[in-house]
Amino acid sequence: MAVNPSSGCCPEAGKQFPCQGCNISSQCCDSYEFCVSCCLNPARTHEETAIKMKVAKPATAGSYGSIFNFCAGRCRHNSGSVVHENAYASEMHHCFSFQLNSSVYRNI
């Protein structure tokens, strides 16, 4: 992926929200960058739900301030993709899926 050297931004042309190297059904990707991109797609992640999610389990934990922060955080942190505390279970270890059985949801 090319970046405009003068602005530091992605080019205007090209596919928006690419999911190259991602498994859409598991919502996991083999690269962090494409995980964030795929997660940012409004068809996959609803902003209202994402920004209400808590960053961590404690009741005092804050929420994600934006859809970008949610996607960046989810794709970076996923304890379910680690085995033996120091190895990934598969190459697809950047995941943006919601963990419905966890206590990270706020009461809406």
Image (spheres, rainbow, N blue to C red):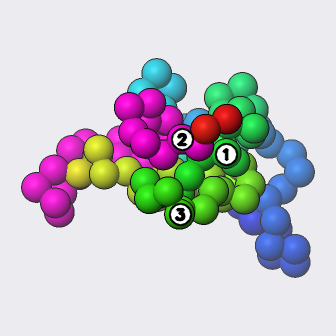
Please rate how many residues cluster around mark 1, counting C-alpha atoms within 10 Å: few if below 14, some from 14 to 19, many from 20: many
Give the mark nearer the N terminus: 1 vs 2: 1
The residue singled out by tag 2 in the image is 105
Which amino acid type is marked by label 2?
Answer: Tyr
103 lies above or below 6:
above
Q: x, y (%) of residue 105? A: 54, 41
Which amino acid type is marked by label 3?
Answer: Thr
The residue sitting at 65% across, 29% down in the picture is 44
Q: x, y (%) of residue 34? A: 57, 47
Distance in Å between CA atoms under marks 1 and 3: 14 Å
Q: Are marks 1 and 2 in contact (CB under 8 Å)?
A: yes
47 lies above or below 60:
above
The residue singled out by tag 3 in the image is 60
Q: Mark number for residue 52? A: 1
Quadrant into which the C terminus falls: top right
Please indicate whether residue 21 sits to the left or right of residue 72 in the image: left
Q: x, y (%) of residue 12? A: 89, 51
The residue sitting at 42% across, 48% down in the picture is 94
Please indicate whether residue 56 sits to the left or right of residue 48 in the image: left
Please indicate whether residue 62 sits to the left or right of residue 74 in the image: right
Which of the two residues, 34 or 103, is positioned nearer the viewer here?
A: 103
SS assignment for the magenta stretch, majority: loop
The residue sitting at 48% across, 46% down in the picture is 104
Q: Which residues are magenta?
A: 83-106
Secondary structure found at label 1: helix
Secondary structure found at label 3: loop
Question: Would residue 29 be seen by someone viewing this image from the given angle?
Answer: no
